[in-house]
Image: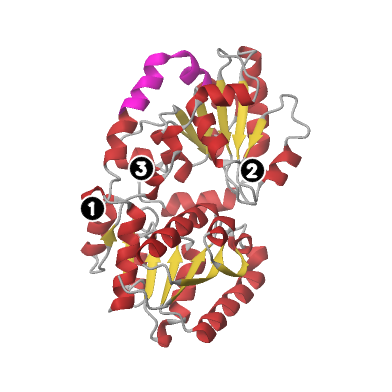
Amino acid sequence: MSTTTHTIWLLAGETSGDELGAKLIKALRHFNPSLKFCGVGGPKMQEQGLELLFPMQDLAVMGLVEVLPKIRMLSNRLNQAVEHIKTVRPDVVVTIDSPGFSLRLLKRIADLSIPRVHYVAPQVWAWHESRVKKFPGLWEKLLCLLPFEKEFFSKHGLQSTFVGHPILETEVHHGNAEQFRKDHQLSDKAPIVLFMPGSRRSELPKLMPVFKQTLSLLKRQLHDVTAVIPTSPLAKERVLHMVNDWPVKPIIIHDPQDKYNAYAAANAALTKSGTTTLELALAKVPMAVTYRVNPVTAMIARRMIKVPYVCMLNLLANDQIVPELLQEDCHPEKLSAMLMGLLTDPEKAKAQQDAFTQIMHQLSGPNDELPSHVAAKEILEMIKG
């Protein structure tokens, strides 16, 4: 690859995008060490050399109702990003997920003649297929993480490339269970349950109170159960504050290796929908998925959703291998009962684990190459072209 200095402008709006962006920057530098990176991201992208325009936490808002109070701030940030791109004139702009903000940005810079790449396909196959009509002209290249997305977008006349899922590049499945129990002074037999509420400001207030009650109910049945909450460094302080009044204190972790060790030690998990389900599946942790949003948001979403499941594992398996307890079913009694089933029924847990193995095979990129390397090559081809 050429060593000519080029600038790549990147945008990531949430923790999962920051992790994806960090892997992408590292892969791009593997092929061209002289590249420069600027834009919007989180701490992991900054560690890889991203020059930050503004913190990505400003964009980490989810929910149709929840976003309303943030509209003015989001509009200002959009204008700021557009002006920065006009000033920097990068060789390519790469937006990572966060379609609410990313697609608006791509549209605003359409007349700048700067190549645009969107990484992580918008999940219109789940929400509203007619929205595909708005996509032509938004990007020059779409990079997909899921195998069925290429066919979906091709059906609508949009070129896309399946690069594989970056979850396969993590060390999720290389944790040390014995080390985790030793580090946190846990007995070999104490059951460990992961509670994963996400890191968004809009998610934590909805799920943490439910998890608090769920853990209390679980503790009545399994006296030696230990709860662990993996969280991001950005959300750590908020989570610690929220568990202050919990009668049963969970272990809060944010270090990646500690998290992987927790996965290896865990007997079950209760998680929000999203990338965490793939992490848990790769680590073979039996799980249930739950989620709760504003009732108005939920009512609108139910009318729009076109797929039978919200959990990515269930979509890839085309079967509900992971229980989904959403909205009204996101209730402490139902959640604790589901976890008890996973903890006390070995056959139920093993059925999930066997299915996880099959699903992970689907996420490998072309020729089993690292997904971040496939994505990096696609982006560098645009600069070369």
Q: Earlier in the sequence, mark 1 or mark 2?
A: 2
Q: Where 257 falls versus 143 (above or below)?
A: above
Name the N-terminal-most of marks 3 and 2: 2
Residue 62 makes an appearance in the image: no
Count of numbered labels shown in the rendering: 3
User: Which element type, helix, strand or loop, lies under badge 1?
Assistant: helix
Q: Which amino acid, by three-letter code, is at mark 2?
A: Lys
Q: Quadrant of the N terminus?
A: bottom left
Residue 39 lies in the magenta-colored region: no
Residue contact between numbered discs 3 and 2, judged by CB atoms under 8 Å: no
The CA distance from mark 3 to mark 1 is: 28 Å
Label 2 sits on residue: 206
Residue behind mark 1:
366
Cα gap from disc 1 to disc 2, whole angstroms: 39 Å
Query: Where residue 273 appears, x then y in whole percent?
Result: 48, 42
- Residue 188 in the image: state x and y as whole percent: 56, 14
Task: Please state the extent of the stretch shown in magenta in the rendering.
Answer: 339-354
**Magenta segment, prevailing SS (helix, strand or loop):** helix
Q: Position of residue 343 (x, y in %)?
A: 49, 17
**Crowd rating for badge 3 (residues with CA inside 10 Å; few <14, some 14–19, many 20+):** few
4 in relation to 174, above or below: below
| Figure quadrant of residue 349 | top left
Residue type at mark 3: give it.
Answer: Pro
Q: Position of residue 117 (x, y in %)?
A: 37, 70
Residue at image location 31% in from the left, 26% down from the top: 354
Choose between 106 and 365: the one closer to the eye.
365
Q: Nearer the viewer, residue 6 or 17?
A: 6
Q: Which quadrant of the structure image shows residue 277? A: top left
